Image (spheres, rainbow, N blue to C red):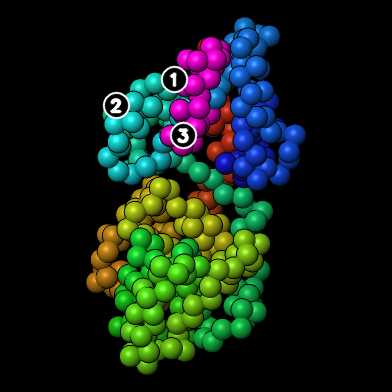
């Protein structure tokens, strides 16, 4: 929301109810001010649009509309890929416009959303390396090529699928090093330790590196060093990791979760594998690691794909057009 907000500001007049770590505090409006502001229509005679991204935000919008008599229309972005609870179904019915971010999420909305607007990525933050080999050396890790997975170290993210898919084939690809980048919370320490024990038992400690949580500003550099990025979640709302990797020039392998089936062109930018399928994932990784030239070509293709269809500017423009359309 914060990333797209920067570009929305250039296209429409926008304010944010709640501080949400805003980069520009002048955009902040408390609930009380919103309730006052929205008692009247805009000078054009049109209603204002309240864009909600979570259930509690729709509830706040309905409170404004039904109790405070705010003259607003409600747009709701619903991204969940699961059967909705009764309250979410009610909130969807009460909203004036429904947005979703992927065809998978759209399938769970009765009657479908009004529009699918996928998330975009900032191409200035995530870009390919001028010299990937040098970027890799700068990380100080062994081997010649990186294959990474990003996100918290936990079952939902499929970190175990990543590691167990690589264990049978890693010795055949000594130039590759697996990088697990993400925080391990206290309740997942046992999960992590079990995976580390499996790596040790296979004698592959030099080819697997848990580098922990890194500051956001460091992530683009790590992505640029990767030849392959895996995103193997068992469930995901959207999953920006794939776009960040493709924008950085890495080939991708992803599960069927999130929006990844909409994004990845099979065999051109990378591969889609079934969730929780170690055998298929291992086979595809073996193929990608065995032909590094073809894999790097996938990374080039992926960057072009993001440039054409998944920029943050495109997301902001589509979103603003839709919101303006609700005012009619």
Q: Tell which of 111 and 210 is nearer to you.
A: 210
Nearer to us: label 1 or label 3: 3
Q: Secondary structure at mark 1?
A: loop
Q: Tell which of 54 and 270 is nearer to you.
A: 54
Of pointers 1 and 3, the one earlier in the residue sequence: 3
The stretch of residues the image draws in magenta is: 51-73
Residue 56, label in figure? 3
Which picture quadrant has residue 255?
bottom left
Q: Tell which of 67 and 169 is nearer to you.
A: 67
- 52 inside magenta stretch: yes
Residue 111, label in figure? 2
Which picture quadrant has residue 189?
bottom left
Q: Secondary structure at mark 2?
A: loop
Q: Counting other residues with Cα less than 10 Å from the Cα at mark 2, is it few (<14), some (14-19), or many (20 or more)?
A: few
Nearer to us: label 2 or label 1: 1
Q: Secondary structure at mark 3?
A: helix
Of pointers 3 and 2, the one earlier in the residue sequence: 3
Nearer to us: label 3 or label 2: 3
Give the position of the N terminus as an image quadrant: top right
């Amino acid at each position: 929301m914060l990333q797209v907000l920067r570009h929305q500001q250039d296209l429409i007049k926008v304010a944010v109810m709640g501080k949400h770590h805003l980069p520009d505090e002048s955009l902040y409006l408390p609930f009380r001010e919103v309730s006052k502001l929205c008692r009247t229509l805009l000078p054009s005679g049109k209603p204002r649009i309240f864009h909600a991204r979570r259930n509690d935000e729709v509830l706040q919008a309905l409170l404004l509309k039904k109790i405070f008599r705010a003259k607003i229309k409600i747009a709701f972005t619903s991204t969940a890929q699961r059967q909705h609870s009764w309250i979410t179904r009610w909130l969807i019915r009460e909203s004036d416009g429904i947005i979703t971010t992927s065809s998978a999420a759209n399938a769970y909305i009765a009657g479908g959303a009004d529009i699918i607007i996928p998330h975009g990525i900032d191409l200035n933050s995530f870009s390919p390396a001028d010299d990937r080999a040098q970027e890799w050396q700068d990380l100080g890790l062994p081997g010649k090529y990186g294959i990474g997975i990003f996100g918290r170290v936990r079952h939902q993210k499929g970190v175990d699928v990543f590691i167990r898919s690589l264990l049978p084939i890693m010795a055949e690809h000594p130039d590759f090093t697996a990088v697990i980048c993400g925080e391990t919370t206290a309740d997942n320490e046992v999960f992590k330790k079990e995976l580390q024990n499996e790596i040790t038992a296979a004698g592959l400690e030099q080819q697997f590196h848990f580098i922990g949580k890194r500051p956001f500003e460091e992530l683009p550099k790590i992505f640029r060093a990767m030849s392959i990025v895996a995103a193997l979640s068992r469930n995901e709302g959207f999953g920006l990791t794939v776009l960040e990797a493709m924008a950085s020039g890495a080939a991708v392998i992803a599960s069927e979760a999130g929006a990844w089936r909409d994004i990845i062109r099979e065999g051109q930018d990378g591969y889609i594998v079934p969730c929780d399928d170690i055998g298929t994932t291992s086979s595809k990784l073996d193929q990608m690691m065995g032909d590094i030239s073809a894999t790097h070509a996938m990374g080039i293709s992926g960057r072009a794909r993001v440039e054409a269809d998944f920029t943050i500017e495109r997301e902001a423009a589509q979103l603003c057009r839709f919101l303006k359309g609700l005012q009619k």
